[in-house]
Image: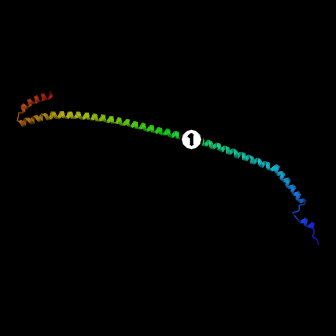
Amino acid sequence: MSPRTDVVAEGNFLIPNGTFFVELLIFLIVLGVMWFFVVPPIRKVLAEREARADETMVKTKEARQLFAEAEAKHKAALEKVRSEAAAIRSKARAEGREILDQMRGEAQQEANAIVAEAEAQLRAQADQVAAELRETVEPLAKSLANRVVGVDDRRAGTSRGQQTGRASS
């Protein structure tokens, strides 16, 4: 008994038959349709996406440069403003010291004027009090001296006029 080879060949899936070629033809047709109708829109979308990504990168670089320039300008302006503020503060302090010194000088002058006026008033009062004391003490001293010496009050009265005349001249 010899085995049948045609039955074995019919059951062997490794041997190509007509179905295989039909499936291959359908596959190639589907592949061609996809290649011409599906792939081009996808490529177009991907190209647009890549172009947008490139454009975004360029805009990002420009924005970074603009930001860096703006930040540098901001820092320079801030430094300028700080230096101006420091100059204004130092000028204000100098003006404040000048005004303070001026006010101190004026206050010192007023105090000196008040002290001088008070000294003048005190001298005038002292002179007045001294004059009044001389007027009151002088007759008392003469009468006391006359009593001690034993001279008459009558003579003392005439001598008072002479003494007063001497004192006034």
**Residue 94, image quadrant:** top left
- Is 60 positioned to the left or the right of 18 in the image? left
* Residue at (21% x, 35% y) in the render: 126
- Depicted 117 relative to depicted 24: above or below: above
**Residue 150 position within the rendered picture, expressed as x and y whole percent measured from the top left:** 5, 35
Count of number-bearing discs: 1
- Is 2 positioned to the left or the right of 154 in the image? right
Query: Element type at marker 1?
Result: helix
* Classed neighbour count for the residue bearing mark 1: other residues with Cα under 10 Å, few (<14), some (14–19), many (≥20): few
* Residue at (64% x, 43% y) in the render: 63
- Is 98 positioned to the left or the right of 27 in the image? left
**Residue 9 position within the rendered picture, expressed as x and y whole percent measured from the top left:** 90, 65
Q: Nearer the viewer, residue 12 or 54?
A: 12
* Residue at (59% x, 41% y) in the render: 70
**Residue 114, image quadrant:** top left
**Residue 64 position within the rendered picture, expressed as x and y whole percent measured from the top left:** 63, 44
Q: Nearer the viewer, residue 48 or 7?
A: 7
> Which colour style is shown?
rainbow
Residue furthest to the bottom: 1
Residue type at mark 1: give it.
His
Q: Nearer the viewer, residue 133 or 93?
A: 93
* Residue at (66% x, 43% y) in the render: 59
**Residue 164 position within the rendered picture, expressed as x and y whole percent measured from the top left:** 12, 29
Residue furthest to the front: 2
For label 1, the residue is 74
